[in-house]
């Protein structure tokens, strides 16, 4: 039950959460009751918490619908250039609170539910996360949708409506166990099915070259059924659309070759077609060349391109007769952004549409494709790059294979003319790789078929130009750009940390929420004792709240006065959770040796999912939980050190843990993390960063001042130099006694008394073939962690450093990122203008 608001609470609510006007609250209550009445079926007169959640969601959704219709009408009349963000992942999390924030309804809903005897937070907790992503790439797409709407761009997110998103993680006996994420079980109030825009998608079949042109015949058809989700901008009355496709078998599926007794089986086989949108592949930074995945990639691309071309042809310039038939102006009206290589088939599919269906000649069509498409690269890890076997293509998408061969032939002809006799360059730059079986290099296809190629942080963009795509950069340097990632300050500050958002607004107003660069004016308050105290107080309140959450859900009691040292992200060797483990063990050994010393108490939290087939990552989770079992039950250590594994890390848990964190662990080997975005979320929420000079950490140090981050370890140049001479793990093991002790404890069974050789594989990897050089950064990491502990003992100096960090966050708004994409890649101009609300006269 909600408590009545104190005067201080009411003061906190000046603005950031929207005003609870009397009419607003009365309206909301009557709409809520109307929805509740129609939600309850005749034979149920007692409402459940879920009924109340759906009533509230539908009430809030009503505020979106008018704005949504008006926005789309506005685009139809103005006919602006439209941008299509194609992604196999959209990691959206929950929608209710974000919608209330962007529509300035939070206080009114809070008050209305309170007057109805309900607690809004309890209702929010009923909503399932839309977990249609693995991590950074999918969450970036979600932040981008928020920024595109907030900047008034005519933007559409296109992806797949997976029936099962990223698995739910259970930790059982210290091991990860996966269970299916049945997120649609109770229905999704935020989506609207649009069967009128259903589209056919073709697979298999064969290609006929006829006098009338090329025909792809005898295909199997799957229908793509779109579901639309509204994407509201921040208080500008704009509501864009995310359209996710679901696979449906056609009515005559498998019945054409109907044989006696086969009817039942034919209907059952509809599942085979509908499996295309069944489940998200749970790999992060790893390529798995399965036919079903290729089907998914083509499914989203084929359905989306039909939609793009339909909308392009139907745009009316305000006239009712005109229909656009000339596709040569497509690049003036359409931009397609490929989020990694997963939607790379958009390039050959658009060629197929223009050449085979619209009958354009090749050169004209190719010019349109290149001017329309742009590609974002997200990783340099070789195991993550998509390389599809040619025979899989030949079977599934025979016409696309022909088109790719033709693209390659013309591409290599050009390279051959530019570099006569350089056969090795031709081999390196070909779209077809010939080493162990013919494979299509999808990144090469994307570069050749796009007018712009970007990395996601300055250092990453430099690395791709110097290494993986060096040949392409030498040939077309003007194609290569940088677009450093960002995060939306709506979800990642206003929504998840209203206390901090308000403390900032009290000093500098609330315009910073749409113009995050204004945070730099906080530097004027870095010596203001009241501001320092307010910032520290908000952090302490967030820690208390998260401690209570952990106690309730995980039955662990933690010391809220300890430093909250947090590493949350996908479990991967390159992210070096193992380096964190070595620090934990070192700290434990030091405390055991001298328990009376005045240690800085720490609660170390690690969370994240491991891909189900990634054995090493699953062993890392078991190691972390095993270390926790020893450390947390050692009476000598007591409250000085606790190790918590945060089960089922996801968007909604991030929104709780990040505002409560003191120290953010961003410790990947330099040159491996393309950007990172969690690093930015911690920075914005008042945590300090311990990290390597990798990804966006480099730019964070530049913005806040390197002296205000705890930077340690090898730089990219040091890693490259070490690769030349060879990394020798044993030399560090032999030279550093604390490292040797920690490793001997892991390998000797100290953390697995029942199974002494449980971690044999991990130890062997670290000692013999560690691609990510954990030991090489161990000494610098431990020394830097010692500096962290010392500073934490001086709360005022710590909080001043926090303020420098928050003030340096402006660059890391996804609004800045999207403004750069719009101006430098899409040829569009962002705008902070509001459009008229549905209840305003037009």
Image: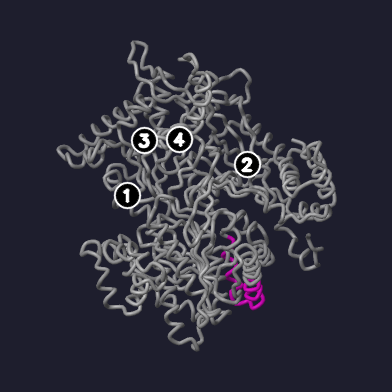
On screen, 229 above or below 272?
A: below
Mark 2 touches mark 4? (CB < 8 Å): no
Mark positioned earlier in the residue sequence (3 or 1): 1
Q: How crowded is mark 4: few (under 14 residues within 10 Å), some or many (20 or more)?
A: many
Say which residue appears at 85% left-offset and 48% top-offset: 26
Q: Closer to us: mark 1 or mark 4?
A: 4
Question: Residue under circle 4?
Answer: 296
Depth order, front residue of 835/33: 33
Q: Is the magenta stretch mostly helix, strand or loop?
A: helix
> Looking at this rendering, what residue extends furthest in the bottom direction?
596
Question: Residue under circle 3?
Answer: 449
Q: In this view, does 787 lie to the left or right of 93?
A: left
Q: Closer to us: mark 2 or mark 1?
A: 2
Q: Residues within 10 Å of mark 2 (few under 14, many from 20)?
A: few
Cα gap from disc 1 to disc 4, whole angstroms: 22 Å
| Residue 123 in the image, given as x and y percentages of width and height | 72, 52
Mark positioned earlier in the residue sequence (1 or 4): 4
Say which residue appears at 81% left-offset and 46% top-offset: 46
Say which residue appears at 65% left-offset and 73% top-offset: 537
| Disc marking residue 650 | none
On screen, 716 above or below 379?
A: below
Query: In the rendered structure, which segment of residues is drawn in magenta?
Result: 518-537
| Residue 273 in the image, given as x and y percentages of width and height | 49, 28
| Residue 101 in the image, given as x and y percentages of width and height | 68, 52
Question: Residue under circle 2?
Answer: 185
Q: Residues within 10 Å of mark 3 (few under 14, many from 20)?
A: many
Question: Residue under circle 1?
Answer: 382
């Amino acid at each position: 039950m909600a408590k009545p608001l104190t005067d201080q609470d009411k003061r906190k609510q000046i603005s950031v959460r929207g005003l609870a006007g009397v009419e607003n609250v009365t309206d909301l209550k009557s709409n809520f009751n109307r929805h509740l009445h129609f939600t309850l079926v005749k034979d149920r007169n007692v409402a459940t918490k879920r009924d109340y959640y759906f009533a509230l969601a539908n009430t809030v959704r009503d505020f979106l619908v008018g704005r949504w219709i008006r926005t789309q009408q506005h685009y139809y009349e103005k006919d602006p250039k439209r941008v299509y963000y194609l992604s196999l992942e959209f990691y959206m999390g929950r929608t209710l609170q974000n919608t209330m924030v962007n529509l300035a309804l939070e206080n009114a809903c809070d008050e209305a539910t309170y007057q109805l005897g309900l607690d809004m937070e309890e209702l929010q907790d009923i909503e399932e996360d839309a977990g249609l992503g693995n991590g950074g790439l999918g969450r970036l797409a979600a932040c981008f949708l928020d920024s595109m709407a907030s900047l008034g761009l005519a933007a559409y997110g296109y992806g797949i409506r997976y029936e099962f998103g990223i698995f739910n993680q259970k930790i059982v006996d210290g091991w990860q166990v996966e269970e299916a994420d049945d997120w649609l079980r109770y229905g999704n109030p935020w989506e609207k099915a649009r069967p009128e825009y259903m589209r056919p998608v073709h697979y298999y079949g064969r290609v006929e070259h006829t006098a009338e042109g090329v025909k792809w015949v005898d295909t199997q058809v799957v229908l793509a059924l779109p579901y639309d989700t509204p994407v509201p901008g921040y208080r500008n009355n704009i509501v864009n659309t995310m359209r996710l496709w679901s696979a449906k078998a056609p009515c005559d599926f498998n019945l054409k070759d109907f044989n006696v007794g086969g009817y039942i089986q034919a209907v059952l086989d509809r599942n085979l077609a509908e499996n295309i949108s069944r489940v998200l592949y749970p790999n992060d930074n790893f390529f798995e060349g399965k036919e079903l995945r290729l089907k998914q990639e083509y499914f989203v691309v084929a359905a989306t391109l039909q939609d793009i071309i339909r909308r392009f042809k139907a745009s009316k310039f305000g006239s009712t007769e005109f229909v656009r038939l000339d596709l040569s102006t497509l690049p003036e009206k359409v931009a397609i952004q490929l989020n990694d290589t997963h939607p790379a088939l958009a390039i050959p599919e658009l060629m197929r549409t223009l050449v085979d269906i619209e009958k354009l000649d090749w050169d004209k069509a190719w010019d349109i494709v290149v001017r329309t498409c742009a590609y974002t690269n997200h990783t340099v890890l070789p195991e993550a790059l998509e390389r599809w076997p040619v025979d899989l293509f030949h079977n599934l998408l025979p016409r696309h294979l022909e088109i790719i061969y033709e693209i390659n032939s013309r591409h290599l002809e050009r390279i051959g003319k530019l570099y006569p006799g350089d056969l090795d360059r031709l081999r390196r730059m070909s779209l077809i790789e010939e080493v162990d079986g013919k494979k299509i290099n999808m990144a090469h296809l994307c570069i050749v078929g796009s007018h712009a190629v970007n990395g996601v942080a300055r250092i990453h963009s430099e690395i791709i130009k110097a290494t993986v795509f060096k040949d392409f950069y030498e040939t077309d340097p003007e194609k290569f750009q940088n677009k450093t990632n960002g995060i939306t300050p709506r979800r990642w500050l206003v929504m998840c940390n209203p206390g901090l958002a308000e403390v900032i607004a009290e000093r500098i107003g609330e315009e910073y929420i749409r113009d995050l660069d204004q945070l730099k004016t906080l530097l004027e308050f870095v010596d203001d004792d009241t501001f320092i105290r307010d910032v520290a107080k908000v952090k302490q309140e967030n820690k208390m709240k998260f401690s209570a959450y952990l106690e309730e859900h995980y039955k662990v009691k933690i010391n809220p006065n300890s430093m909250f040292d947090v590493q949350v992200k996908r479990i991967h060797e390159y992210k070096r959770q193992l380096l964190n483990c070595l620090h934990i063990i070192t700290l434990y050994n030091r405390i055991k040796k001298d328990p009376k010393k005045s240690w800085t108490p720490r609660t170390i939290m690690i969370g994240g999912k491991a891909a189900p087939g990634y054995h090493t990552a699953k062993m890392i989770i078991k190691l972390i939980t095993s270390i926790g079992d020893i450390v947390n039950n050692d009476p000598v250590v007591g409250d000085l050190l606790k190790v918590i594994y945060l089960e089922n890390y996801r968007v909604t848990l991030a929104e709780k843990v990040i505002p409560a964190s003191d120290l953010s662990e961003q410790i990947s080997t330099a040159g491996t993390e393309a950007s990172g975005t969690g690093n930015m979320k911690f920075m914005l929420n008042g945590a300090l960063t311990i990290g390597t000079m990798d990804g966006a950490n480099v730019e964070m140090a530049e913005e806040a001042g390197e002296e205000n981050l705890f930077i340690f370890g090898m730089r990219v140049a040091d890693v490259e130099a070490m690769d030349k001479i060879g990394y020798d793990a044993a030399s560090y093991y032999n030279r550093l006694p604390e490292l040797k002790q920690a490793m001997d404890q892991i390998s000797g069974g100290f953390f697995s008394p029942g199974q002494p050789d449980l971690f044999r594989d991990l130890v062997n990897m670290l000692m013999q073939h560690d691609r990510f050089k954990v030991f090489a950064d161990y000494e610098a990491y431990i020394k830097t962690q010692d500096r962290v502990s010392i500073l934490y003992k001086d709360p005022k100096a710590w909080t001043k450093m926090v303020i420098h960090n928050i003030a340096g966050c402006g660059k890391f708004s996804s609004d800045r990122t999207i403004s750069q994409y719009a101006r430098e890649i899409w040829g569009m101009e962002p705008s902070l203008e509001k459009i008229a609300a549905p209840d305003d006269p037009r």
